Amino acid sequence: MDLVKSVTAAGSAAVITVTGIHPIDVVKTRLQVSGGEGSRNYKALGIGGTVKVILSEEGITAFWKGIGAAWMREASYTSLRLGLYGPIKDAMGVTGKSHFIMKFTAGSLAGAIGSTVGNPFDVLKTRMMATEGKEPPSMAKAAGDLYKAQGISGFYRGLEANVMRAMVLNGTKMACYDQIKGYIVASGVIPKGLATSFIAAFSAGFFMATTVTPFDMIRTKLMNQPPDAKIYKGFVDCAIKIVAANGPQGLYAGFFPIWARFAPTTTLQLVIFEILKPIFGVSGGGE
């Protein structure tokens, strides 16, 4: 029962958080798919220029394109990768004093499970955010078009990259969060509580952006391929083509929007999760 409570609390925290953070994700996605066939070169515009163009040409609501799919993604993917971390730690016998690798492994396992379940919504969210024009795309229409063109397999485009990204992301996020929180509490400078969780979560966001950006870039490219075409053969082929076209730095396109998203997202998710834990009756988690 603790597992269900933990997943429910995590999902609630994730849905609340993504509603406010989604505009940053839209800008990040536009920068990553920039310059493709038939799409605007947002990289040349930069973050400020991209925001200005979206606002002037598509309106304020464009920053919430794909929010329906994002909510579904958070309710499936994030609820599992965040909510399963504690139960998996308990099952592995991981405690606050355990090695960083053990915490990373528990986070990675939770991330892999969550990304596999949430991949269809991730594909839809990515495609909807990348769609230009004033008319917000319908999730039902986007799903119907994708199914007609590619069948069920279309919803699992980029699964390999997504699972790898989720394992690195969640392993880094939860292990760094636990480790940093432990150091702060041990130092005695700040008493254990929301302030400790806030600092630990914000710090974890930077390490997440550093390790995850290349995987995020590759995942976005794979998921945003045209419904009737397959530009990349897979994860490795996509990585090679990105580096060949733009150099190694091409894998870090959108780093600052990702960091700008991860810092508040990680902080809000984990702090809200800590607040919701006692409300949902969640205990344990290898503390």
Image (spheres, rainbow, N blue to C red):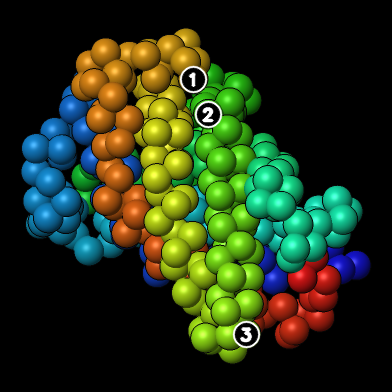
Q: Which mark is residue 235?
A: 1
Frontmost residue, 134 versus 100: 100
Please state which amino acid type lies under the numbered disc 3.
Lys
Please tell me whether mark 1 sits on a helix, a strand or a loop.
helix
Say if mark 2 contacts mark 3, CB within 8 Å: no
Residue shown at the point (67%, 39%) measured from the top left: 112
Q: Give the image location of residue 167, x and y in percent.
A: 61, 40
Horizontal arrangement in the rendering, residue 182 relative to residue 157 (left or right): right
Q: Percent x, y for residue 188?
A: 58, 85
* Residue 259, horizontal then vertical, whole percent: 34, 54
Q: Is residue 202 above or below residue 187?
A: above
- Looking at marks 1 and 2 on the same chain, the residue that comes earlier in the sequence is marked by 2
Rendered image: mark on residue 192: 3
Task: Place residue 280 in its image quadrant.
Answer: bottom right
At label 2, the amino acid type is: Ala
Tell me whether circle 1 and circle 2 mark residues in contact (CB < 8 Å). Answer: yes
Label 3 secondary element: loop
Quadrant of the drawing holding the C terminus:
bottom right
* Alpha-carbon span between mark 1 and mark 2: 6 Å
Q: Residue at the spot x=24%, y=21% of the render?
A: 247
Quadrant housing residue 260: bottom left
Q: Is residue 63 visible?
A: yes
Q: Position of residue 71 (x, y in %)?
A: 53, 58
Q: Residue at x 54, y 46 (%)?
A: 169
What residue is pinned by disc 2?
161
